[in-house]
Amino acid sequence: MVISKKETESKKIRPETDNSGKYPKPRCGVYGVEMIEKEVKARGNTGRIYLPSDWVGKVVKIIRID
């Protein structure tokens, strides 16, 4: 199997130009073991996400996607 040089080059991230005066959304890349997509639920004056009990003591990262 032959892979061309073009396929192996990393793509440069170009911000999409938007004339609304706002900054473009950043792109984030995360590598991990497992992923769960959930909605944040209201709890008092804060938000909460429930995760599996086997994740207790593990390091997690939260990224807001909308």
Image: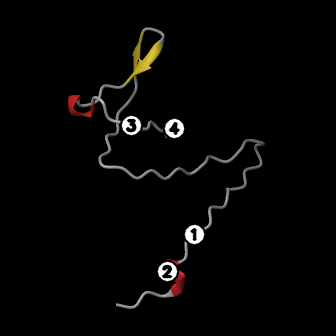
* Residue appearing at x 32%, y 44% in the figure: 35
Q: Residue at x 49, y 53 (%)?
A: 29
- The 10 Å Cα crowd at callout 4, few under 14, some 14 to 19, many 20 or more, is few
Element assignment for label 3: loop
Q: Amino acid at mark 2?
A: Glu
On screen, residue 63 above or below 3:
above
Mark 1 is on which residue type? Answer: Lys
In x, y percent, where is residue 23? 71, 44
For the residues labelled 3 and 4, the Cα–Cα distance comes to 19 Å
Q: Residues within 10 Å of mark 3 (few under 14, many from 20)?
A: few
Identify the mark at residue 60; answer none if there is no mark.
3
- Residues under labels 4 and 1: Cα distance? 24 Å
Marks 4 and 2: in contact by CB < 8 Å?
Answer: no
Looking at the image, is mark 2 or mark 3 earlier in the sequence?
A: 2
* Label 2 residue SS: helix
Q: Which residue is mark 1?
A: 11
Q: Position of residue 54 (x, y in %)?
A: 21, 33
What is the crowding at mark 1: few (fewer than 14 residues within 10 Å), some, or many (at least 20)? few
Label 1, label 3: how far apart the Cα atoms are: 27 Å
